[in-house]
Amino acid sequence: MNKQALRRVNSGLKPVRKYNKTLFCPEFILILQTEIDTIMAELTHQEIKIDTSFYRISEIRQLTESTFVLSMPRCRFTFRPGQHISVSIKGDYQTREYSIYSGNNDEALEILVKEVEGGYFSPKLKGLKPGDYLEVHGPFGKFGLVQKKLDTHKHVFIASGTGIAPFHSMVRSVPGLDYQLVHGVRYPSEAYERDHYDEERYVLCTTRDPENNFHGRVTDYLRQTDFKPETAFYLCGNSDMIFDAMEILKEKGFQREDITVEVYF
Ligand SMILES: Cc1cc2nc3c(=O)[nH]c(=O)nc-3n(C[C@H](O)[C@H](O)[C@H](O)COP(=O)(O)OP(=O)(O)OC[C@H]3O[C@@H](n4cnc5c(N)ncnc54)[C@H](O)[C@@H]3O)c2cc1C
């Protein structure tokens, strides 16, 4: 491509030389690619790069019989707390999404996984050992802290089961965050790594074992709790819990824009 044609491309004009020849010359493809990258970055308002790489499992923390944390060296992986990755295992055509459990200042990239009985993928994850590799795609998703409310609102996180994962990432990533975490499980043993949260900010709701906890579902807890108007709600987990919680919050006078949602299944 001659200088004049290059100038026209840079200034947003079409090159005037023979179209096919110009379109497929290396300089033009380079310019086109740079422009596409710029447009994509502007569209997402982020400089985060979508990555696809193999990550070696360095550690597995077994939290209960069925639930575990897969830990991998993070390398150059960047993300916003609340985002998820898509994971696959070598030789398997299936992928599944998992919220990033670790914080964005942690050295490891971690996911929290519950083995679903009769499920296809999570039992395969359970069978992995340190040294095995995972193919990781991402990060993806818009779930995350509402930036404009960061310093003005209390952030109430409502999770069922492994829905606690993105909140773990947020709490680890933003020291001093004014939050309350309401975690719904069946048994107290499912209070995954409870010591990672400020004791006074963590409410465990158990449906099967009332000992020292709120006895009931997270939705029962929400019904009988008052919240200040300056509260940002975040819901993560199974869809039944999320729909019920949204109804309760609506009855309490909160609007859809006060609530951010991530549905797992
Ligand atoms: C954005 C996003 C983030 C997610 N993050 C996590 C995470 O951090 N940790 C995690 O463990 N899972 C997470 N999931 C769910 C995960 O992607 C898989 O669906 C889950 O691991 C089950 O996969 P499977 O192949 O074993 O089951 P499948 O064979 O795909 O499904 C079997 C059945 O299990 C149900 N199911 C799916 N997940 C669960 C669950 N957690 N508990 C009970 N039943 C379930 C499905 O609805 C289906 O009916 C996330 C899902 C989404 C969409």
Image: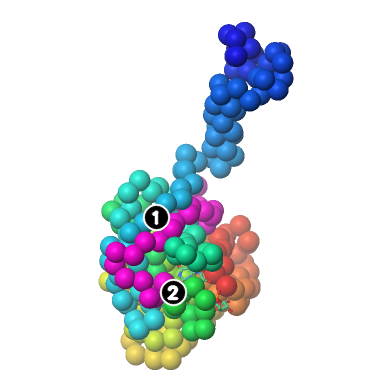
The residue segment tinted magenta is 124-152
Amino acid, disc 1: Phe
Crowd tier of the residue under label 1, counting other residues whose Cα lies within 10 Å: few below 14, some 14–19, many 20 or above: some
Image disc number at residue 124:
2
Q: Which residue is nearer to you in this view: 104 or 10?
A: 10
The picture places residue 39, in percent across and down from the top left corner, at 59, 34
Amino acid, disc 2: Lys
Q: Which residue is nearer to you in this view: 253 or 216?
A: 216
Q: Which residue is mark 1?
A: 54
Which residue is drawn at the image coordinates 44% and 56% (left, top)? 136
**Alpha-carbon distance for marks 2 and 1?**
17 Å
Which residue is drawn at the image coordinates 44% and 81% (left, top)? 185
The picture places residue 153, in percent across and down from the top left corner, at 46, 56
Label 1: state its secondary structure: strand
Residue 188 visible in the shown view: yes
Looking at the rendered image, the quarter that the N terminus falls into is top right
